[in-house]
Image: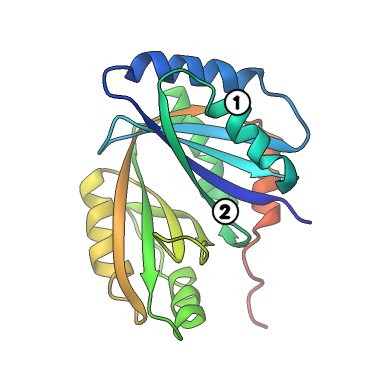
Amino acid sequence: MRPTLAIIDVDIFSGQDELVREALLESLRQFHEPCLTVLWINWLRERADLRVVCLVDDLERFDDFLVNVIRKVPGVRGTAAQLAFDGVVRVDALMDLSLLSAGWDRRAAATVQVKLQPGRDEEAYRALLALPKHQQVEVVWVVKVFHSNDADLLLLLLGERTAALTGYVMSWVRTVPGVQDTHLTSVLDWQILGRTEDFLALAQRFPEPSPAP
């Protein structure tokens, strides 16, 4: 089976924010198994919770990773994972994420959960992939998470500022025929744990479609 993109939201107890963050980072740094590659961890803006993004090569070992690496960290209240088996990851925008972690680039970032109208799924998906270039916003990925209760598609956006991301979603994403609703979550901070080759592997796993002849 081909690798799977996993987005894991980690709910933490109030008042233990920094302790959990440091302990979870240490737990993730110590994890070295070929079944899974940790790409990065985010600190979410709306809540003092965390998001871990991974590329999973062996789904049979994924539960072990959740239990032994994440859920054993003191202060973790619960986890929820979304798995993407199909979609597009744009390599140029993806490689910019390392600048966010290094502090050289202070652009805003956000994830957007998109609910689609049943029966118009592929139409809306193709339209979101074909959105025109924007001066202030980059679409890092559009991935399918149809088995999730919260969304059918997941977008990752980079922009000059949070207002630009919000405006982009309102003007471009929410107006796509077949899009029923969206939910935007701003990202406050990044800690990149993956290597350059790991990011290239992610982009190769979810390549952009070839242009029509």
Residue 151 lies in what quarter of the image?
bottom left
CA separation, marks 2 and 1? 18 Å
Indicate whether 20 appears above or below 49.
Answer: above
Neighbourhood count class around disc 2 (C-alpha, 10 Å): few under 14, some 14–19, many 20 upward: many
Indicate whether 127 appears above or below 38.
Answer: below
Q: Is residue 41 left or right of residue 85?
A: left
Residue at x 47% of width, y 82% of height:
123
Q: Amino acid at mark 2?
A: Leu
Residue 193, visible in the rendered structure: no
Percent x, y of residue 57 = 74, 45
Identify residue for label 2: 83
Identify residue for label 1: 69
Percent x, y of residue 189 = 37, 29
Neighbourhood count class around disc 1 (C-alpha, 10 Å): few under 14, some 14–19, many 20 upward: some
* First reached walking from the N terminus: tag 2 or tag 1: 1
Q: Amino acid at mark 1?
A: Val
Q: Quadrant of the N terminus?
A: bottom right
